[in-house]
Image (cartoon, rainbow, N blue to C red):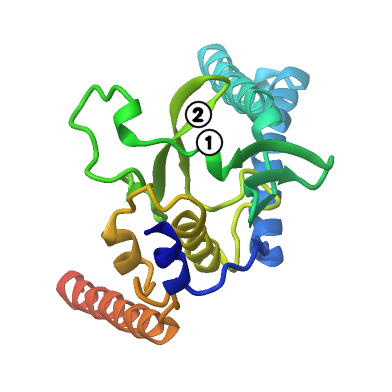
């Protein structure tokens, strides 16, 4: 049965993420600017008197603590995620690998055979209907994908948005292609793993031939843009 399923699938081809250089550089510079802004604020407050800053003693202490808290929090976040940051996602016949090209270190390696069934996980809330599921968290733009994996003899739920986790390599230009290769690879190498059909619909992937309908995607984006413009025009006339 599995051989019959595989024969009906299109051929699997490996894919490597392609970062959007310009946008990623902007995001990286924004992170650096954020860090330097609060560092400069602390240095400014420490090296200038109250008369020079125009702040009283209470305001000076308050601003110093705010800047210090922001700097320490941001630095701690960077330190915490330092060993988890990756720039590149590779999906091939071996599985999925997350690589940090800045130091040439593989951050995580998920072979196809480590994928697990949802029955292997104890869910606190209602378990998902499929082994591979997705949703869009609140205040998020991109979908998050969830599926159980067996790592170090322990089954845990892995999540992936098919984006980089590095300030200078966060957005991929071929994200749809990565998602398409992921679901096709799962069908090829783990036909026992079930995939939520909504994933195909939301990402313009034909479940029969696994082709991405870029035309439909452009149309939806175009009409979405027009709708946003219409809302802004209506708000403008309502306000003014």
Q: Residue at x 73, y 32 (%)?
A: 40
Task: Tell me which corner region of the image, top left, top right, bottom left or bottom right, holds residue 211.
Answer: bottom left
Direction left: furthest residue: 238
Q: Where is residue 220 in the image (x, y as percent from the top left)?
A: 32, 80
Residue 162 vs residue 127, the one in the foreground: 127
Residue 228 drawn above or below residue 158: below
Identify whether 73 is placed above or below 115: above
221 w.r.t. 52: above or below: below
- Considering the image in quadrants, where does the C terminus appear? bottom left
Towards the viewer: 31 or 85: 85
Q: Do the residues labelled 2 and 1 touch (CB within 8 Å)?
A: yes
Residue furthest to the right in view is 103
Location of residue 198 in the rendering, given as x and y in whole percent from the top left corner: 27, 60
Quarter-of-image position of residue 223? bottom left
Can the viewer see residue 38 in this picture? no
Of 226 and 162, nearer the camera is: 162
Q: Which of 192 and 104 is in front in this view?
A: 192
Cα separation between marks 2 and 1: 5 Å
Q: Provide residue 232's location: percent of width, then percent of height.
A: 27, 74
| Vertical comparison of 50 with 174: above or below | above
Callout 2: SS: strand
Per the image, the residue denoted by label 2 is 150
Q: Give the quadrant of the N terminus.
A: bottom left
Residue 213's x, y, as percent?
40, 81
Task: Give the residue at mark 1.
Answer: 114
Q: Residue at x 65, y 38 (%)?
A: 109
Can you tell which mark lies on residue 222?
none
């Amino acid at each position: 049965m599995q051989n019959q399923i595989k024969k009906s699938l299109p051929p699997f081809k490996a894919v490597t993420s392609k970062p959007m250089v310009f946008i990623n550089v902007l995001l990286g510079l924004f992170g650096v600017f954020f860090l330097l802004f609060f560092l400069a604020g602390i240095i400014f407050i420490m090296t200038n008197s109250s008369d020079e800053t125009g702040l009283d003693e209470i305001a000076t202490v308050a601003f110093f603590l705010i800047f210090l808290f922001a700097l320490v929090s941001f630095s701690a976040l960077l330190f915490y995620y330092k060993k988890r940051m990756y720039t590149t996602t590779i999906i091939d016949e071996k599985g999925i690998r997350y690589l940090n090209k800045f130091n040439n270190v593989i951050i995580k390696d998920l072979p196809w055979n480590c994928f697990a069934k949802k029955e292997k996980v104890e869910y606190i809330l209602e378990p998902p209907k499929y082994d591979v599921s997705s949703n869009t968290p609140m205040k998020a733009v991109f979908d998050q994908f969830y599926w159980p994996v067996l790592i170090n003899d322990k089954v845990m739920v892995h999540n992936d948005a098919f984006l980089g986790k590095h300030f200078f390599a966060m957005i991929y230009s071929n994200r749809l292609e990565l998602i398409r290769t992921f679901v096709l690879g799962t069908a090829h190498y783990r036909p026992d793993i079930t995939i939520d059909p909504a994933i195909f619909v939301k990402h313009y992937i034909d479940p029969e031939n696994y082709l991405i309908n870029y035309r439909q995607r452009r149309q939806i984006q175009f009409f979405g843009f027009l709708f946003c413009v219409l809302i802004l025009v209506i708000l403008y006339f309502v306000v003014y």
